Every structure is written in structure tokens, then in C-alpha cells.
Image (spheres, rainbow, N blue to C red):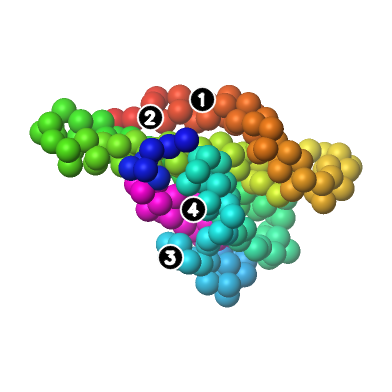
Amino acid sequence: MPSLEQIILAVPAILLAISFHELGHGYVAYRLGDPTPKYQGRLTLNPLAHLDPLGTLMLVLFRIGWAKPVMINSHYFKNPRQGTILVSLAGPLANLLLGWLFYNAAKLAAPRLPYTTFSSTLMVFLLINVEMNLGLAAFNLIPIPPLDGSHILAGLLPPRASYGYAKLAPYGPVLLAVLLISGGARLIMSPIYRVLSQILLRLSL
């Protein structure tokens, strides 16, 4: 379990990570021609527009969670399959970008900050933001409905296989619940998290 300090610092980090993630989905969908996210008020960094209470609590306590999904209408896209993949990728990529920004901020600040309690807290906060964003991206890339990874996989599969895969969607939340309770979600996330970490490190300043 995280310390009290980590829990307190995690709250604003989670709110920002969730908001950035969902704004990424909504913005790309809007740019591809779908006005739905705009009509639903999801083109914002206001966390109140994106929060799912249970998903947020899970993020605070276990570093695994989710936000309220951005609804899209793929019929507005010129290429619905491609558009859905791009929208689904946008959320995790937004978190990877935000994690990259916080990582580089921590990297630049570390040798320049004095050794004070405030500096220590600031570094913890920056690194929590990196962890939160990479964790949120990795979790959402798991290919189990309704996570982003399932939409990406469905868009990459041949039409017949994609149709069969879509039939599993009603069972996705139950499977996710089992994985979260059993710890299996972390086993699936770990390699995804490592890959994202390597990308972040390779692209760092």
C-alpha cells in the first residue's frame, strides 16, 4: 500500500492523467469528424467531466484504474476501422506524452534542487506523475473489452475475426474484475509497462 504522502500526491496526478487521457480520445475523434465528444463536453481537462468514482479510487489505492469512457460514433469517420484505432491509441499516447514531460522535468530538476523537504516532495510528485501516466496507458492497452487495447485489436483483426472477438465484449468487465482481484492484471500490464518505459527513456532529453 502507498504511504499517506503518496496517496495525497497521487490525487492531482490521477486527475491530470485521467483528464489528459480522455481529452486525447475526444480530441482525435473530433478532428476525425465526430462531434460527439464535443457535444458531451469531453474536450476539456476538467476532471469532473471524465471521472469514474470507482476507477479513480482504484487508481489511488492500487495504481490500476479507469475513467468514464468517451463515447464516439465511428460512422463519422472516413475510415471507421482506422479511425477507431487512432482514437483508441490517442488516450494511451497522451499519457505517454505526459509521462515523458514529467520524467524530463524530474531529470532536469534533480541535480538543481536543494536538499530540502519541499524538494523531496516535489521529486516524489513528479515521479508519481510518471508512474500514473505509464500505468494508466499500460492498463488501457490490455486487449480486454472495454479497454482501449480491445478496440485496437478489433480494428487490426480481419473482419470475421473482429466480429467474433466483439461477441466477447459482454464478458470483458467480468474478466477484468477477476484479473484485478487476482492480481493477473498486473502480470499482463508488466510487459506493456516495461515497453512504454523503454520508449520514454529512449525519447528523453
- Tell whether position 27 is magenta: yes
Q: Within 10 Å of the Cα at label 2, are there few (<14), some (14-19), or many (20+) other Cα atoms?
A: few
Is 201 positioned to the left or the right of 185 in the image? left
The residue sitting at 65% across, 53% down in the picture is: 83
Look at discs 2 and 4 and give the one toward the viewer: 4
Residue at image position (53%, 40%) is 62
Determine the residue located farthest toward the bottom in the rendered image. Answer: 39
Q: What residue type is labelled 3?
A: Asn
In the rendered image, the vertical position of residue 28 relative to residue 113, given as above or below: below
Which amino acid lies under the numbered mark 1 shown in the image of this protein?
Arg
- The residue at which mark 2 appears reads as 203
Q: Residue 18 carries which label?
A: 4
User: From mark 3 to mark 1, how far is it between C-alphas?
Assistant: 30 Å
Image: magenta residue range: 8-29
- 56 or 92, which is in the foreground? 56
Find numbered disc 4 in the image and state the secondary structure of the residue it sits on: helix
